[in-house]
Amino acid sequence: MKRYTTIAFCMLFFAFVGKQNLFVVPKNFPPPVYDFKNNPLSVHKIFLGRTLFYDPILSTNNTISCESCHSPFSAFTHIDHALSHGINDSIGTRNSPALMNLAWQKSFMWDGAIHNLDMQALAPISHPAEMGSNMKEVVEKLNTSPKYRQLFYQAYKDSVASGENTLKAISQFMLTLVSANSKYDQVMRNEVSFTEQEFNGYLLFKKNCASCHTEPLFTNGNFENNGLPIDTQLQDLGRMRITGMAQDSLKFKVPSLRNIAYSFPYMHDGRFKKLTDVLNHYSKGIVASKTLLPQLNGNFTLNSNEKVDLISFLLTLSEKEFVFNPKFQYPK
Amino acid sequence: MQKELDLFFMKEPTQKTKVFEILFLMFLLLSFGLNGFCQQSEKVKIGVLVNFANQPIVLHDSNYVLKDGSFVKFEILKFYLSNLQLLLNNKVIYAEPNSYHLIDCAVLSSQNIFLGLSQNIAFDAVKFNLGIDSLTNVSGAMGGNLDPVNGMYWTWQSGYINAKIEGSCLLSPEEKKEFEFHLGGYQNPFNPLQTIELNTTSSNFNIALSLDAFFANIDLAKQKNIMLPSIDAVTLSKRLSKCFSIQ
């Protein structure tokens, strides 16, 4: 009897430990926004989501996967492409955002059109210039695939795919994309220290950037107009498209700066290729308008040494482990 | 008591107990069967009918006549009824749990709603929402009637489409003479959710949606498309909510 109790305890313990490891809130992070109770993580569901993420089956002509525009090696964005492209070489209107720490994100897309991670994948699946499909078509295709019937059975004890289970599985994989072990994080945990240049950059960052790119996620999740001249071809008004309010004109979501060295080009339309281009914009390229973020009204002045220091700090936000994590890559 | 239990489960069954057991089992089966049968027939049933000038709507083929004499044809008619409640003297006496019904004119079975309670309940009104409430809108991916495969969830931005009314009419300036009303959204100031309360005491009643009343106030030559949350979507949702009645 005693032996059985011990075994039962051990099993319970390992079940508990096993569950805990699927998603750990980093010590310096706030509680996540995503409601895990509605979609409890499991190894099989994450694997199903990861398989879907890398599978062009999600697009109408089986050519484009999530990974096409969100490659792990660029912190899950579309490297070298200012505007991302989808099926039949269609070009979109925005730069695909890097994917990380999505459990802490309140809204998705540059204009916050999507309010829940579960619903995010619907947008690229349905957009005619991205995957050009729809959820019904996707689910029908998945249900005729013996591979997916097996994966769905393993994940949900039901081999039939539904829209809900498909979307939730994709969420599960995306939730595991946590980046919280950059040099910056290690410094914050007192494991290593900044160089003098990085430290000076950190001070400049706190003075000039941190009100929007707030630590530790390096975004406050808000929408702001950062003074970019409007692209006359794209005529993208950003957040205003969603709210219909003039006060949101030209506002876009403040992106996280984590892994920024990997996720070029920058801005909602990918107009800047290098970090120096970005800093040059903030120091001398700001276009004044009614909705311009007040902090940017001529307050951002950095000399060239300071710019170099600031960039050296920004590079401490890179996490090689995240970008090359085999658990995040093409499932084998 | 213990003795009886022993008799039933532990002891070698005698001829007598065997007969008793079989009789008892038969009685159990019969009573469960009857019970199930009775429950099925006694549940409060709500039929949902979509009409145009008292004619039931048939998608794709039939033409219906607008006030000015022009013909209108329907291709898609889908809408959500949610949060169904029965009231007595303005008090809620029954609230259907997990109450989300997608009424689809193309799916006959979607037009019958069986509430999980028997007909011997007294009520004098039925109350429901036309559309999906804002809390459900922000609660992530859902299944069944709320599954995005139903095509009632916007993809370019988040939010349910409460009602889809699509068809064609020569008045429409569109090339293919189509009109498309997608009434949805959940955020203020453009939250189109409507609550409807209708009086009825029958436990087997029909809720009718009369589309002639809805189209009586729309000029399809001017207003033929609504595809996003807007003040127009709110106005049309209000108008649609006034077209429900008990039949």
Image: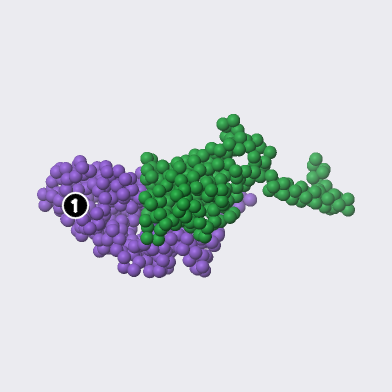
Say which residue appears at 62% left-offset and 35% top-offset: B123
Q: Closest to the observer: A196 or B93?
A: B93
- Report if residue A311 is visible in the image: no
Q: Colour of chain B?
A: green
SS of the residue under disc 1? loop
What hue does chain A carry in this figure? purple
User: Outermost residue, front direction?
Assistant: B69
Q: Is residue B180 left or right of residue B80?
A: left
- At label 1, the amino acid type is Pro
Question: From what the image shows, is residue B133 above or below residue A277?
Answer: above
A100 and B71: which one is in front? B71
Horizontal arrangement in the rendering, residue A44 relative to residue A285 (left or right): right
Q: In the figure, is residue A181 to the left or right of B151?
A: left
Name the residue furthest top: B89
Tell me the colour scheme of the image.
by chain
Left or right position of A176 against A264:
right
Q: Quadrant of residue B155?
A: bottom left
x then y, percent, for residue A4? 60, 52
Indicate the position of residue B235 as horizontal and vertical percent values: 41, 42
Q: How many marks?
A: 1
Depth order, front residue of A323/B206: B206
Residue depicted at 15% across the width and 51% down the height: A285
Quarter of the C terminus of chain A within the rendering? bottom left
Q: Residue furthest right?
A: B15
Residue plotted at (68% across, 48% down): B40
Identify the residue under disc 1. Answer: A229
Residue B243 seen by the camera: yes
Residue A52 percent coordinates (x, y)? 43, 63
At which x and y percent is residue B91? 57, 32
Determine crowd level at label 1: few under 14, some 14-19, many 20+ residues with C-alpha closer than 10 A: few
| Residue lying at 30% horizontally and 58% vertically, measured from the top left | A96
